[in-house]
Amino acid sequence: MPWFKAYGAALAAFLVLDALWIWLFVRKFYDARIGDWMRETPNMAVAGVFYLTYIAGVVYLAVRPGLAAGSLTTTLAHGAVVGALAYGTYTLTNYIILENWTPGLVVTDIAWGAFLTALVAAAGHLAARG
């Protein structure tokens, strides 16, 4: 049962925080740099698959080790590493192959991925303990 709580809390936190980030901050940033490449409306089915599987990975790779160690700090650290690797893979691949991808996008994506995933993992950790 704690795994369902962890997954649910992490998913809820991820959806809220990522939506706020995208719609309040990043949308304009991306629009200015890669606006011609963006869809008018996001493909929500694909987004759903990403969110559901990513959170399963966060729970397994960050929340589980943190709970096993009895340490929220461990969960935060593992979450940050998972986020930096996942978002780094995406943004660095884009930087390698897309001419208009900028170093600013690379840095922003990696930092956001690490921060977001650490927070989301912490939400899952706290929910599983509570």
Image (cartoon, rainbow, N blue to C red):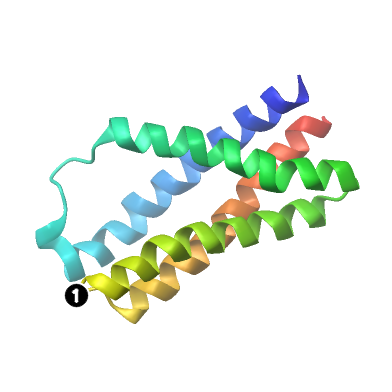
Taking the view exactly as shown, the residue that stands out farthest to the top is 1
| Rendered view: 64 above or below 28 | above
Between 78 and 31, the one nearer to me in the picture: 78
Taking the view exactly as shown, the residue that stands out farthest to the right is 70
Q: Residue 8, percent across and down?
A: 61, 28
| Rendered view: 99 above or below 82 | below
Left or right: residue 119 versus residue 113 is right
Left or right: residue 128 versus residue 83 is right
Please tell me in which quadrant of the rendered image residue 1 appears.
top right
- Residue shown at 77%/25% (left/top)? 2
- Residue shown at 77%/31% (left/top)? 128
Q: Residues within 10 Å of mark 1 (few under 14, many from 20)?
A: few
Left or right: residue 55 versus residue 46 is right
Taking the view exactly as shown, the residue that stands out farthest to the bottom is 103
Q: Residue 72, percent across and down?
A: 81, 50
Mark 1 residue type: Asn
Q: Residue 47, percent across and down?
A: 35, 38
Q: Residue 120, percent across and down?
A: 61, 45
Q: Quadrant of the C terminus?
A: top right
Residue named by callout 1: 100
Between 18 and 48, the one nearer to me in the picture: 48
Secondary structure at badge 1 equals loop
- Residue shown at 75%/40% (left/top)? 125
